[in-house]
Image: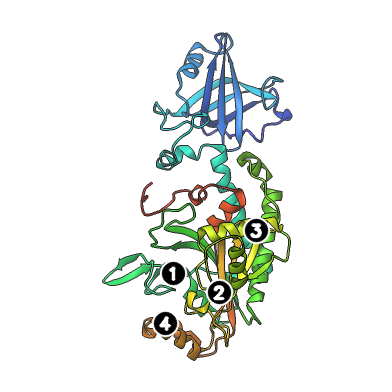
Amino acid sequence: MSVNAPTRSSITITKEDFDQEVTIRGWVQDVRNLGGILFVILRDRYGVLQIAVPKKKVPPELFEALTTIPRESVVCVAGIVKESKQAKMGFEIVPKSMEVLSKAASPLPLGVVDKVGVEVETRFNNRFMDLRKAETRAVFEIKSLVLDLIDESLEKEGFVEVFTPKIVASGAEGGASLFEIKYFDKPAYLAQSPQLYKQILMSTGLDRVYEIGPAFRAEPSDTIRHVSEFISFDGEMAFISSQRDVMDVIERCMIEVIKGVSERGSKQLETIGAQIVVPRSPFPVLTYSDAVDVLISEGRMMKEGDDLGTEDEKALGEVMKSRGSDMYWIIEYSESSKPFYIMEKEGTPFSHSFDLDFAGQEIASGGQREHRYDALTNRMEKKGLDASSFRFYLDAFMYGMPPHGGWGLGVERFVQKMLGLPNIREAILFPRDRNRLAP
């Protein structure tokens, strides 16, 4: 047989193909030998189909080859589609010929359809095999859909997609949590975010930009929500009246994305076993002080000025859930807790800042930026930063910078919370943390 014959997938075979010859390719998921007949379950990206091999109706060498082929081998099968009320898909294929494209070694590092539990480290060490599981693969099909929906939403809002450097001379938030690298004969860093560059673009006339790309944080955290490399969805918009303009764009985007996933990702959601609810708009808004008061009333030992830690966020999420909201804003954080580029709220210790929390976890952060050159350099001095190290950034503020604001949203955190995944690493093909650098 020729492996160059047109290939059909399991999802495209219909009643019109009954009694017709087709060629299919995929992985051997299981082989059941009942003596007089052999059943091979073949899997491709879209599902599984059954190959029925009557011992008396096929060449002996073909029957023998299918009997002994290891699970997860890759094969190309040509055969006739036959209606079958016993087969799950309503048909089966009686093979005429088969070619083994790649024989799998045995034993397998982990099972694909076995019900036996596997340690998470074993799964990540053998990610190529783990991703053959439909429920694992469905997460990344959903993630791809999320990125498509973000593009669609931002295009409607008049945004231009941009791509900024990931090798940078300085960090967006100073020297903390940066991966230092050698860049020819100079020190450089992996970018924490596109923050400084997207702000520079606000002075160019590209007044609404967004970027979806990798970001790096050298934080030695071993949690279910932190990794060293992640995909960040960042946006910046000029000529705003307040940070509410920014929040409205994100809110519309989140609603459109979740609604789109519920409508266009129903098959994958069913495979994962996830149920999602489109949030109601407008999202509730709490000030940071409001959030602290709520947490104190819930018995959390904290006071004004404390960071909202992981357990605090979870507790607040439970309260907001009981009020009917899984997505909600927290605004007006202390200016001292925010980076230098966030605008202070004049006459108060607070800032024009916000977080978007989803089911008890922060997924996005942003606010109105300080666009006034003198005020910005004063903020930098206040934060102990050397303005001369940020000359490339500050120059854009000297020659006409409009009021602007923006956000950064962790795509994997969003996917994790939307799908109810136990760990952010489940939403990353090949996760990177302080213990994992391969595969």
Image position, residue 202 (x, y; %): 55, 80
Q: Which mark is residue 165?
A: 1
| Residue occupying image coordinates x 71% and y 49% | 263
Query: How far separated are the C-alphas under marks 4 and 1?
Result: 13 Å
What residue type is disc 4 on? Phe
Sequence-first tag of 1 and 2: 1
**Badge nearest the viewer, 1 or 2:** 2
Q: Is residue 391 above or below residue 70?
A: below
Q: Is residue 389 left or right of residue 308?
A: left
Which residue occupies the foreground of this view, 47 or 51? Answer: 47
| Residue occupying image coordinates x 46% and y 37% | 129
Q: Secondary structure at mark 4?
A: helix
How many other residues sit within 10 Å of disc 2, few (<14), some (14-19) or many (≥20)?
many
What residue type is disc 2 on? Tyr
Q: Secondary structure at mark 3?
A: helix
Q: Residue furthest left?
A: 185
Q: Secondary structure at mark 1?
A: loop
The quarter of the displayed image where residue 359 is located: bottom right
Query: How far separated are the C-alphas under marks 4 and 2?
Result: 28 Å
Which residue occupies the foreground of this view, 81 or 359? Answer: 359
Q: Is residue 372 above or below residue 62?
A: below
